[in-house]
Amino acid sequence: MPPRWWLQWARQFANGRQLSASLGLTPRQHSSGGKERLLGISKRGDAYLRSLLVYGARAMLRTARGKEDRLSRWACQLAERSHPNVACVALANKTARMAWAMLRNGTDYRPDLAAA
């Protein structure tokens, strides 16, 4: 069971997207007049935690080719159709959202739900 302050930290966000945005893992919006434009990641928030998530995602992408779980297949497909750095940040974003869901619900990691 994670420490109590982790649970309180996870509860301050309404959803995983808010957590990702606070870490700087979601695209920054430059929108006007109903035309939505999303540019690169915003790089606001906790730079150290964001870098740990990105480094972890980069390591996972390097070893995902030989694995058959859903998350590894999703990551490999994403890396094939986009730039490796984009796939790395997308995987870090997904990892942060999964961590939020596990902390918020008090559950353990379930690989069968990872890429759903």
Image (spheres, rainbow, N blue to C red):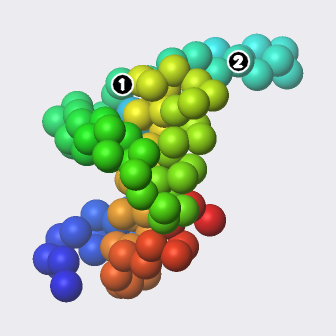
- Which residue is depicted at the point 58% across and 37% down? 78
User: Which element is circle 2 on?
Assistant: loop
Looking at this view, is 68 or 113 the one in front? Answer: 68
Where 43 sits versus 17, above or below? above
- Compared across the picture, whether 40 is left or right of 109 comes to right
Marks 1 and 2, how far apart at CA: 17 Å
Read off the residue under disc 1. 43
Amino acid at circle 2: Arg
Q: Position of residue 116 (x, y in %)?
A: 62, 65
Q: Dot 1: few (<14), some (14–19), or many (≥20) neighbours within 10 Å?
A: some
Where 40 sits versus 26, above or below? above
**Picture quadrant where residue 52 is located:** top left
Q: Is residue 18 visible?
A: no
Looking at this view, is 63 or 10 the one in front? Answer: 63
- Which residue is depicted at the point 52% across and 33% down? 79
Amino acid at circle 1: Lys
Q: Position of residue 32 (x, y in %)?
A: 76, 14
Read off the residue under disc 2. 37
Give whichever of discs 1 and 2 has the lower sequence position: 2
